[in-house]
């Protein structure tokens, strides 16, 4: 009891927490302010000279108490030392005046000189020179600011060496903050300029600078920031052209990681010591570097050409950290500048999808499921090709699939050489996604330019099934009704089904133009038809409907559909073809509504009259 009281007193002095030590056999518990209950122990067996389990437990508990006593004594000593040191510094500074302040500055700057990089030290030198030039009343505040800066740099350097997670957070926020501040300053400056031409020139310059900074952030930190950069770079209808031009390079031209990382993942995943145990040939130059993995071409021992997809090291943990930062950034932007869209729901959906994307065994399974669905629909392999995984070479962090030789949709030279029309390619893509989204309810959710290949015979190949979205049945039926209304240009029904999907706008639904505004949103968010020239979707513009009728609620389960349709729109822009996916979805919407609902539904199958009308509409559209 004396030992425990001493320990508790020491912890109280040190301001620490008391640890509860519990023994399952003896039910003896020691806690803050509690009593130690007596326990029964077994005595040593004198006949055989062995010690019973009770004495072993006694020895272990004595060791635990001894370690606690030493630890609490050390904590108490540290607390006393901190108080004494702080008091001594206060006395020294108050007695020495300016000499003490200078001494403290010298100590902090000395630590900064030892731990900071050359560029950071130059920043501090500039600060010192600036302080020497200011007047005396301001000098004290400047010195405190310099001291804070020096301590911050020391912390950043220590985080880089000892706390990688903290260092990554610092890198993100130190990159995002200047971008946000510069854009806010440009916004203020643009309000003072009366000439529209000068304002456009000012914004164009700022967008070029911002695009480079965001690209550098994505490629330097990689992780989930790459995924965000890819999506932003695909929305030419939503973000500035300079951002689209620069961030589109993230689709499949990400700077590669060293080959050693890929070899390590390969060996750990398949239990081999070298790639030669699996492949006859292996290309060291990657075919593509994606968000979480890198792809290399190889040849199996039986001569088949395949590709290896292997995850980057420690990427899953980094992406989870990135999502925490993105959630904090989204909450800040939601409360300040981006009130026109539900950013929090977007991050929530990404948080749900992220663990699935790091399971390559699931990706291989989903690739097989979608391939079989498209095969039953008669689309695969006649119009759409889905690669197959190689049996026995599938793991959670790496897997091997068959090689598909094709080009991107924006490779106009190859398409002309093969006599392939981009519109026919887009029609095949529309048929595949109509079947996946509206009939099967299992959809490839990442169709950016790097994941859609055109083959020499005009067929389309879908690759990278890391992001596959399973659509709930009621949502699938709601999307069928929505796209059927879109295909028929029924503005009222389009607005009604948009609201039925759970999307909410800050408008009066009974206003005369409410359904027209809803239909405009439906076109911009969930279709690929061209947006009218007199409509400004750019969120930075005061004329944008995003400012006059902001989105107050967007269901998280619908975000992957939004993302997919945005990427399909980028394919249409890359092909330089005006193409309406809702029109391509028409027959799949009818087929999707004809499926027997699992539960009671708000979107029943079409009646006989509606079916006849749809047949007439479909026939007339083919004639046009």
Image (spheres, rainbow, N blue to C red):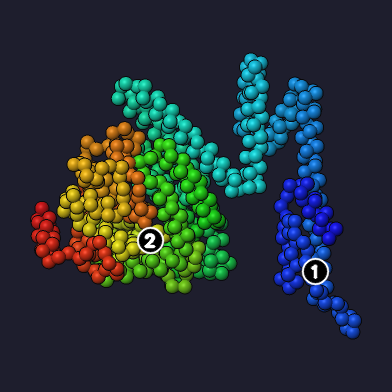
Q: Earlier in the sequence, mark 2 or mark 1?
A: 1
Left or right of residue 360, residue 114 in this image: right
Taking the spot 49% from the left edge, 38% from the top edge, the residue there is 176
Q: Residues within 10 Å of mark 1 (few under 14, many from 20)?
A: few
Residue 126 spot, x, y in % from top left: 62, 24
Q: Does residue 412 appear anywhere in the picture?
A: no
Whether 375 is drawn above or below 583: the answer is below
- Residue at 32%, 33% in the rendered image: 541
The vertical placement of 336 against 266, above or below, is above
Q: Front-most of 277 and 357?
A: 357
Say which quadrant the N terminus sits in: bottom right
Q: Quick one: SS at disc 1?
A: loop
Determine which quarter of the picture holds residue 303: bottom left
Q: CA distance from mark 2 to mark 1?
A: 59 Å
From the top left corner, tell me how far across and down residue 59 is, in percent.
Answer: 82, 68
Label at residue 468: 2
- The residue at the point 40 percent across, 37 percent down is 337
Residue that label 1 marks: 38
Q: Position of residue 161 (x, y in %)?
A: 65, 45
Q: Residue furthest bottom?
A: 47
Q: Residue at x 71, y 52 (%)?
A: 17
């Amino acid at each position: 009891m004396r030992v425990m009281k001493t320990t508790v007193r020491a912890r109280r002095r040190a301001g620490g927490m008391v640890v509860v030590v519990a023994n399952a056999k003896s039910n003896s518990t020691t806690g803050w302010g509690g009593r130690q209950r007596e326990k029964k122990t077994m005595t040593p067996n004198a006949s055989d000279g062995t010690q019973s389990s009770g004495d072993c437990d006694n020895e272990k508990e004595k060791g635990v108490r001894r370690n606690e006593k030493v630890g609490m004594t050390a904590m108490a000593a540290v607390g006393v030392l901190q108080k004494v040191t702080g008091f001594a510094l206060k006395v020294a500074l108050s007695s020495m005046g300016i000499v003490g302040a200078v001494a403290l500055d010298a100590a902090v700057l000395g630590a900064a000189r030892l731990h900071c990089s050359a560029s950071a030290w130059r920043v501090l030198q500039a600060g010192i020179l600036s302080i020497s030039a200011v007047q005396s009343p301001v000098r004290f505040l400047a010195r405190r600011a310099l001291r804070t800066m020096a301590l911050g740099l020391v912390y950043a350097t220590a985080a880089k060496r000892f706390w990688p997670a903290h260092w990554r957070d610092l890198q993100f926020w130190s990159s995002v903050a200047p971008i946000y501040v510069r854009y806010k300053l440009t916004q203020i400056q643009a309000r003072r300029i009366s000439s529209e031409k000068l304002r456009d020139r000012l914004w164009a310059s700022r967008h070029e600078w911002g695009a480079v900074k965001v690209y550098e952030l994505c490629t330097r930190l990689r992780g989930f920031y790459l995924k965000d950069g890819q999506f932003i770079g695909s929305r030419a209808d939503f973000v500035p052209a300079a951002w689209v031009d620069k961030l589109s390079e993230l689709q499949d031209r990400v700077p590669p990681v060293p080959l050693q990382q890929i070899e390590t993942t390969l060996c750990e995943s398949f239990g081999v010591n070298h790639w030669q145990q699996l492949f006859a040939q292996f290309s060291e130059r990657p075919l593509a570097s994606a968000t979480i993995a890198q792809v290399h071409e190889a040849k199996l021992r039986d001569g088949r050409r395949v590709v290896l997809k292997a995850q980057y090291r420690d990427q899953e943990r980094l992406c989870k950290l990135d999502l925490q930062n993105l959630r904090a950034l989204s909450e800040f932007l939601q409360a300040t500048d981006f009130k026109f869209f539900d950013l929090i729901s977007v991050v929530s959906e990404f948080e749900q999808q992220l663990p699935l994307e790091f399971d390559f065994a699931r990706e291989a399974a989903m690739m097989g499921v979608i391939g079989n669905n498209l095969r039953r629909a008669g689309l695969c392999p006649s119009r759409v090709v889905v690669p197959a995984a190689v049996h026995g070479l599938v793991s959670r962090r790496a897997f091997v699939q068959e090689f598909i030789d094709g080009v991107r949709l924006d490779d106009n030279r190859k398409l002309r050489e093969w006599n392939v029309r981009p519109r026919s390619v887009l029609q095949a893509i529309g048929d595949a996604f109509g079947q996946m989204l509206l009939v099967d309810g299992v959809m490839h959710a990442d169709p950016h330019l790097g994941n859609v290949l055109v083959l020499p015979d005009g067929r389309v190949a879908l690759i990278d099934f890391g992001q596959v979205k399973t659509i709930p049945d009621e949502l699938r039926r709601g999307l069928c009704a929505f796209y059927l209304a879109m295909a028929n240009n029924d503005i009222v029904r389009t607005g009604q089904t948009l609201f039925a999907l759970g999307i909410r706008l800050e408008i009066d639904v009974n206003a005369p133009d409410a359904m027209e505004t809803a239909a405009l949103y439906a076109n911009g968010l969930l279709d690929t038809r061209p947006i009218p020239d007199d409509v400004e979707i750019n969120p930075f513009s005061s004329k944008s409907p995003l400012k006059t009728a902001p989105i107050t609620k967007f269901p998280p389960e619908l975000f992957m559909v939004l993302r997919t349709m945005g990427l399909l729109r980028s394919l249409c822009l890359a092909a330089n073809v005006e193409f309406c996916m809702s029109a391509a979805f028409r027959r799949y919407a009818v087929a999707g509504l004809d499926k027997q609902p699992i539960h009671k539904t708000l979107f029943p199958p079409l009646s006989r009259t509606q079916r006849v009308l749809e047949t007439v509409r479909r026939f007339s559209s083919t004639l046009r």
